Image (spheres, grey):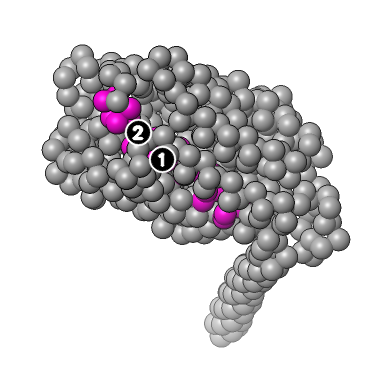
Amino acid sequence: MNQTRADERSLLRRAGESTAHENRRNAEVRSVQSAALHERSAAASTRAAEFRESWRILCVGLVGLAVGLVPGSAAGVFILPLCHYFGWSLSMMSASAVFGGLGAIFAGPLQGLLLDRFGFRCVVLTYIPLSAISVAATCLITRNIWTLYLISFIGSFVGSGCVMYYVRALSSWFEAGRGTAIGLVFAAGGLGCTLGPCVAQYMLDEYGWRLAYLSLAAIVTLAWPFSFAWLRDRGHLLANRPTGIQATANGCTRRDAAKTPAFWLIISACLLSGLADGGLFFLVPFFNENGMSQRSASYCLSLLFAASGVVQPLLGLVNDRLSAPLVAASAYLLYAAVFVAFGLAGSRFAVLESILAGVAVSGVSNSLFNIIPRFFGLKSFGEISGLIQAISAIAGMIGPVAFSLLRDTTGSYTAPYLAASTVAAGASFCMMLAARWPMSVSSWKR
């Protein structure tokens, strides 16, 4: 009898302990859920505050990138018309990418240093008129191919920092909603890139290539009034920053960043990506060779940029919530798949191929400019971005030339696009590895 009562008391005690343990566990789960909900609510509140206080900076970025990327997006439209007008070969024309790459290589580190030293307002207000002048100067080229090479070098030297400038401004004023802000601005850039080939093709058909270049130069200048009126460096409006947002540019120096594996993996991915981009440089001639008219090919190029712009806000939201390197790795894999389709299917699925290529391009660009401030901070954003830009330019200089030589050697675009697909897959692998070595914010030197 006593043993039975002892057993009952023991069972009741264990049951009580189990119930208490379950209650504590449920309380802990509710506490974690409540904390997560509070964190999400606070993050949403901070993002809303950022957009309320910094909408002018966002508008400057929207207009600036929309018009600043127009000349570059229309470059492919002029390849065959200039070849026919001056009697140049495709290889001679593609060599202009080498000199454009040299301009970006020399300019990238310098632009980054100027950006970190003098602030983005001073740099942007100087860059816009110089970029417009360099685009307008293209109408002065002659039959001497070296005039084109010189203009390509100058234009790239002046204008290659366009994206970096506006992303630096956005990164200063947006933190919780940085990915979304960059996505919206890149969407505007996609809209500009969509209209660029259409405007260039229209002006080319109606008025000739010289006036087409002048019209592109005029479009670039539209960003200057907005930048002059609304663009302000962070230090000028510290009192108006949203509550809880850091006003100092923290982060690591370029030397500290170079000591991390992630830095070199990101550099490697950008190098491989630049090599693969040679396939996009010849997209219009590729469609022409596969039976499409010049106008239809130009519209497909516009469709690529339109798709890139449409998905940018969504990618911004994704990058605010997920690992940016993994998003970039996924975009590179899509890049590789699209190049395989170009090489094996030709232009039979031109519309779908152009749309998917646009999604891949937007995924890479949006993720990269979220990775830099997230991994390395803003302290040396310009210097690090300028170095990455220079590395990408080296690859961008080699890619189109290698692509055209491989095409001339094999007599088709199949081998070049399959090679570009392999290179893009390598870039994806580098980004996957970079996701394993993120730089801790606590390791930044403030």
Q: Which amino acid does label 1 sit on?
A: Ala
Residue 28 badge: none
Q: What residue appears at the point 21 percent right and 37 percent down from the top-left corner?
A: 287
Residue 78 badge: 2
386 left or right of 402 in image: right
Task: Locate residue 58: give its quadrant.
Answer: bottom right
Q: What residue appears at the point 68 percent right and 35 percent down from the top-left corner?
A: 382
Whether label 1 touches label 2, CB < 8 Å: yes
Name of the residue lying farthest toward the front: 207
329 or 168, which is in the foreground? 168
Q: Position of residue 376 (x, y in %)?
A: 67, 38
Task: Locate residue 208: give its quadrant.
Answer: top left
Task: Locate residue 284: give its quadrant.
Answer: top left
Q: What residue appears at the point 51 percent right and 34 percent down from the top-left corner?
A: 135
Please state, as top left, top right, bottom left or bottom right, where the C terminus lies in the image.
Answer: top right
Q: Could you classify mark 2 by the number of other residues whose Cα lies within 10 Å: few (under 14), some (14-19), or many (20 or more)?
A: some
Q: How far apart are marks 1 and 2 (CA)?
A: 9 Å
Q: With respect to residue 5, does 339 lie above or below? A: above
- Mark 1 or mark 2, which has the lower sequence index? 2
Residue 314 included in the magenta stretch of the image: no
The magenta segment: 61-84
Q: Which amino acid does label 2 sit on?
A: Phe
359 left or right of 125 in image: left
Q: Could you classify mark 1 by the number of other residues whose Cα lies within 10 Å: few (under 14), some (14-19), or many (20 or more)?
A: many
Q: Look at the numbered disc 1 and give the secondary structure of its residue.
A: helix
Residue 66 included in the magenta stretch of the image: yes
Please state, as top left, top right, bottom left or bottom right, where the N terminus lies in the image.
Answer: bottom right
Disc 1 marks which residue? 212
Whether residue 182 appears in this view of the structure is no
Q: What residue appears at the point 19 percent right and 27 percent down from the top-left corner?
A: 414
